[in-house]
Image (cartoon, grey):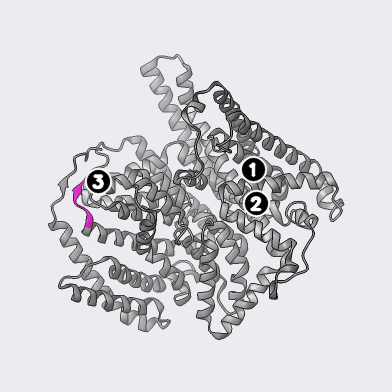
Amino acid sequence: MSQQQATSKAGAPPQVDASRRRSPVHQGCHILSQLLFYGLSLYFFGYLSIYYFTGAGGATLLAVTMVPIAVAIAFINDLRHDNLYPLLPPLIATLIGIVYAGALVYASYYLVTEFEQIRVYRVGFWNDADKVAGGIVVALTLEYTRRRYLALAIVIALLILYTAYGQFVPGMFNHPGMSWNRILTATSLEISTGVFERLPQLGLTLIGSFMLVLAALRAFGCIESILAGSSRLATRAPRLLPQAAVIGSFSVAAVSGSGAANAATTGSATIPVLIRAGFPRVKAAAVETASSLGGQLMPPLMGIGAFLMAEYMRVSYFDVVARGFAPAILYFIGVSVAVYLLAGRYMQREVAPRKEPINWVDIVNLSAYALAVIGLIWFMGVERRAAMSSAQLVFMGLFLALASLFLARFFWALRRQFGRLLTLERLRTLFRPFIRLIETFSTNTAELTVLLATLGILTATFTITGVPTKVGILLMETAGAHLSLMVLVAFAFGYLVGMGLPVAPTYIIVAVVVTPFMIRAGVDPWVAHFFAFLVAAFGELSPPTSLVAAVTSRIAEAPFVQTMISALGLCVPLLILIVGVFTRPGLVLEPGVAQLPAFGLLLIGTLGVIFTFQGRFEGSRARDWGFRLGLGLLSLVVVLYPDERVGWAVAVPVLALAGWGLWRTGRVLQARPLAPSADAAG
């Protein structure tokens, strides 16, 4: 499930009513939109598959060819789900979708056939036909963004107005203003900036190759097997139910890379079970929110931000992934401990979400998932292959193994149960996973490419107006007072930017505007970029516009604001990581053993802070608050004080107090009898 689909689950555009859905006109429009969608998707999937094996034409030509097709797929996908202008009659909406798709296909054809002329011979002197083709792509990219990411569209609209009318802005951000012709060519025909620049190229090449792995896992049921496997923990030991929810969400997040999409995928299974076990609705939604947020941190995908980090730092993707394991594991342990403490307070009933044993297909799917993760790490880390090549090898192995298994199961069942006749329904069953593969890949990759093309427009306006340099001057002046002030200002900037924006645009804005000047002030590049990445991930949670909390609160039927605030308490590890990369830079400077000292200190500090918020000590209320306040202050010393010797000295009492609290919580859980749930078999 893509992030846009997750957004619609959280409740965006209205759906058509049942009478329109049943009308012959609507049915005809739906069939037409389906045919158009699958036609474009097959072309998109086939073209990219060939490119991944041959690299023919290069990434720039690929972007010029496929970005318009990606925008067309995104529009038609909305049309076939009745989300393209749903207030309009189906026929009108379908006609608009066809016009959009036709215009974009024309733009792709024109830009490809005139590629050399536009890129070499007519540079700076583009004709009207060139501008029309480029304008179609820019305008429809922005229109799709307006419908899906309104906050991002507003930011870009304001930046475009600033680019055109900068002479009316007072102070240091004043500039002479630029013509609309210059804005159009900078966001399209110049190619090095705008909708065809390196960001959408990255989406179509490196990220797209990883999307193939994800699509294969989804198409053949591996994601469902992961959820089934995690739920078996609760079947064997009902008290592990909350941990099963966390493990399931983190496992799916490791190959989804999107907090909101992961919440929509796993939350519908985990949240109702937690509620039946006695968790308040708000707490159940908060548990899933915190677990799903790990989708932005957990290798091997780590969300879009990690791919962008590798691109901006000019390093291999595995260099980012290798450093990303320690922060992700720290976050996972922190959330798991917080959920364990919550279970000690709220879990009341025994709930077993699935009692039947896992079958051999689930075991194969789980093995395929594990081998996919191991394969990516092996090819990128041990054999040092390029990330795109590694993803292709893993995809081919996954596809051949899972497709062969599926076909063997299908024809064996056909022979034993149905004879040798292939009915229409059986043909649908036969082709369903392969269609799902193409559908999942094309929709996810297309929507991601559109988002990155939009960010290309954003960075183009930054580049031609010099905004990063001007903001950087302010940051450098702040750093002159103290580096901690610069970090605080940078966090505030990222927080404000991240309100309402996905992770990718937040990371790009912080990486372009802030990190170069942090590096100039003496901050290590890895620290600066991981800071930007973690701040961008925090944007998925930050009040008042947390997309993940919007999804989970909708599933739990819980108040959105309370869910968001409760989730903040569980996501303390992320806030500690944001600060910890500066106080304990060894966490991200060198991968491997060198990360262990910083990892150990930050983990102990994290456990102490979590117990301060979520735990309970024995004794009176005053003594309880006194213990927790003391533990919290000591934990902050472990996290914030730069001298590691002092940190380790303070870590000893922190670990002792937190360990005592965890032991006491375990005793409470063992002593409390769990009442059987009326629907435990569910």
Quadrant of the image occupied by residue 70:
top right
Q: Which residues are magenta?
A: 346-350
Q: Position of residue 577 (x, y in %)?
A: 43, 68
Whether residue 202 is visible: no
* Tag 3 near tag 1, CB within 8 Å: no
Whether residue 342 is visible: yes
Whichever of labels 1 and 2 marks the residue nearer the N terminus, that label is 1
Residue pictured at 24% horizontal, 69% vertical? 659
Q: Nearer the viewer, residue 221 or 385?
A: 221
Tell whether position 32 is magenta.
no
- In the visual, does 45 lie left or right of 578? right
Furthest toward the bottom, the residue is: 481
Q: CA distance from mark 3 to mark 1?
A: 42 Å
Of labels 2 and 3, the one closer to you: 3
Q: Secondary structure at mark 3?
A: helix
Residue pictured at 57% horizontal, 81% vertical? 479
Q: CA distance from mark 2 to mark 3?
A: 44 Å
Q: CA distance from mark 1 to mark 2?
A: 9 Å
Q: Could you say which disc has been placed on residue 453 in the image?
A: 2
Q: Position of residue 116 (x, y in %)?
A: 82, 47
Q: Nearer the viewer, residue 473 or 553?
A: 553
Q: Could you say which disc has been placed on residue 276 in the image?
A: 3
Q: Which residue is mark 1?
A: 71
Residue pictured at 74% horizontal, 53% vertical? 191
Amino acid beneath label 1: Val
* Tag 1 near tag 2, CB within 8 Å: yes
Whichever of labels 3 and 1 marks the residue nearer the N terminus, that label is 1
Q: Secondary structure at mark 1?
A: helix
Amino acid beneath label 2: Ala
